[in-house]
Image (tube, grey):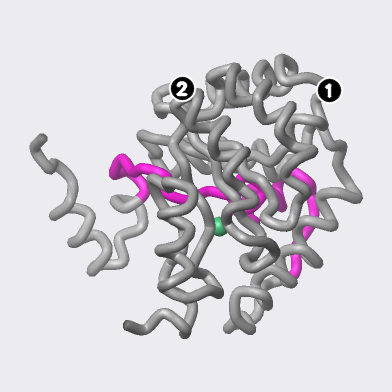
Amino acid sequence: MTDKFSSDFINALKNHDTQTLLSIPKSDVHNHLGRGCRVEWLSEKMNHTFAKPPAVFDGLLGMQDWYVNNIRDYCRAHDSNQTDYRREGCFAEAERNHLARFAPSFSETDIEDYGSLKNFCDYYDSLHKKYCPDAVYEPELAYQSYADIESKLAKAEEYFSSGYFKSIDVCCGEGYKPFSDYIPLYRIAEKYGVLKRMHVGETGTAEEIEEAIETLGLDEIRCWGISNRIEK
Ligand SMILES: [Zn+2]
């Protein structure tokens, strides 16, 4: 396949040319739905001025704290579950950022807020159509790493058999339980041909990444190499 955009992208990056960067087609590699929108968009939609972030976040947890205290909790208190603007803003941002492949990561709660999988799919399909109809839409379903897996399996069967979700992820921290505990969940995903991802290596070691890949047959990991325990 001919690479049509790399040199333009690299040049735009060097020149701080945001408009060109926005206009070049891109793919999502990691998009947590509630965090995938712009504060400016949200601010206008909700008619509220959000506190500015600090110049430097105190690590990943500091960033999370700022987000929870200033963005998430405000939205939850001033919005309804069904129309949480953060989620809509993620679709608006996909259009603004010219995403050719858009892969927002949903949670089970996002589905439950709509009462049924059908209502959920109808709502998000309408946002896809409204904001970014040209983007290939690849919704992901993510589970919290500390959740009780056994109680999630029946619903997981329903959700993945629907064909709506193209990938599975486990996020929200590492080390809560052995990787083998997630095998039943990933087996369901595998049965329906879903891409298998996991957040691993953000705080753990290189050995743990290897163990996760081997135990769960992962296709991709989300790590970012930010752990200072992964140096070699
Ligand atoms: Zn993540």
User: What x and y, as percent, mark residue 107?
Assistant: 69, 41
Circles 2 and 1, Cβ within 8 Å, touching? The answer is: no
* Residue behind mark 2: 133
* Residue behind mark 1: 115
Work out whether residue 109 can be spotted.
Answer: no
Q: Using the rendered view, name the quadrant where residue 135 is placed.
A: top left
In the image, residue 142 above or below residue 15: above
**Crowd band around label 1 with a 10 angstrom C-alpha radius: few (<14), some (14–19), many (20+):** few
Q: Is mark 2 within 8 Å of ligand 1?
A: no
* In magenta stretch: residue 136: no
User: What x and y, as percent, mark residue 87?
Assistant: 67, 40
* In magenta stretch: residue 40: yes
In the image, residue 140 above or below residue 62: above
**Crowd band around label 2 with a 10 angstrom C-alpha radius: few (<14), some (14–19), many (20+):** some
- Identify which amino acid the numbered label 2 is placed on: Pro
Q: Going 80% across and 25% down the picture, which residue do you hit?
A: 114
In the image, residue 140 above or below residue 169: above
Q: Going 30% across and 60% down the picture, which residue do you hit?
A: 17
Q: Quadrant of the N terminus?
A: top left
* Callout 2 secondary element: loop
User: What x and y, as percent, mark residue 198?
Assistant: 52, 52
Per the model, the C-alpha gap separating discs 2 and 1 is: 25 Å
Q: What are the residue bounds of the magenta stretch?
A: 22-51
- Identify which amino acid the numbered label 1 is placed on: Gly
Q: How many marks?
A: 2
Q: Going 84% across and 22% down the picture, which residue do you hit?
A: 115
179 or 90: nearer the viewer: 179
Q: Going 87% across and 37% down the picture, which residue do you hit?
A: 80
111 or 202: nearer the viewer: 202
Work out whether residue 10 can be spotted.
Answer: yes
23 or 127: nearer the viewer: 127
In the image, residue 132 above or below residue 168: above
